[in-house]
Amino acid sequence: MPDERIQILTVSLSYYLTGHRLEDVIKKDWTKSPDQAKRFMNVAFDFDGENVPTALNELKEKLLHQHWDGILVGWCIRGKPQHTTIFEDVIELCRSLPQETKILFCTGPDDLMQTTLRNFP
């Protein structure tokens, strides 16, 4: 039986910048609403800022080989001017997905759940 939950891929530089695994950040934020969390399959993608070409290739593979209802691009990628080219490359990859895939933007590690619920009420 296929997983009926809403599939969300979160892409972040969190681990590269802070040493915090994105999976742990996602779990922590979603503890605020465990009932809502059951509706979603939240998958973490720790983008490697040390090896951008490889990270982009790995992200492309992840995006193309599974259905995603939403791609949440983390604040770590879009919030710093020095990461603008990474942000542009990630968005360009997201644009290659089916049109119904939503691209989401959060304001930080404590906004992942609210961003997802705002886009999938």
Image (tube, helix red, strand yellow):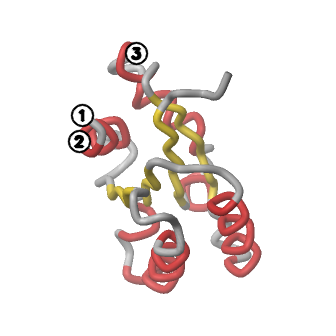
Q: CA distance from mark 3 to mark 1?
A: 15 Å
Describe the element under mark 3 as helix, strand or loop: helix
Q: Sequence order check: which comes first, mark 2 or mark 3?
A: 3
Residue sitting at x 59%, y 50%: 67
Q: Which of the 4 quarters of the picture holds residue 50? A: bottom right
Toward the viewer: 49 or 88? 88
Instruction: Please name the amino acid that badge 3 sits on.
Output: Pro
Q: Nearer the viewer, mark 2 or mark 3?
A: 2
Q: Is residue 118 left or right of residue 9?
A: left
**Residue sitting at the far top:** 35
Labelled pair 1, 2 in contact (Cβ < 8 Å): yes
Residue 49 x/y as whole percent: 63, 71
Q: Is residue 83 left or right of residue 115?
A: right
Whether 25 is drawn above or below 84: the answer is above
Quarter holding the N terminus?
Answer: top right
Q: Could you classify mark 1 by the number of other residues whose Cα lies within 10 Å: few (under 14), some (14-19), or many (20 or more)?
A: few
Toward the viewer: 21 or 19? 21
Instruction: Please name the amino acid that badge 1 sits on.
Output: Pro
Give the residue pinned by disc 1: 121
Labelled pair 3, 1 in contact (Cβ < 8 Å): no
Whether 75 is drawn above or below 53: the answer is above
Quarter holding the C terminus?
Answer: top left
Give the residue pinned by disc 3: 34
Give the residue pinned by disc 2: 118
Residue sitting at x 70%, y 70%: 55
Describe the element under mark 1 as helix, strand or loop: loop
Image disc number at residue 33: none
Residue sitting at x 50%, y 38%: 25
Describe the element under mark 2 as helix, strand or loop: helix
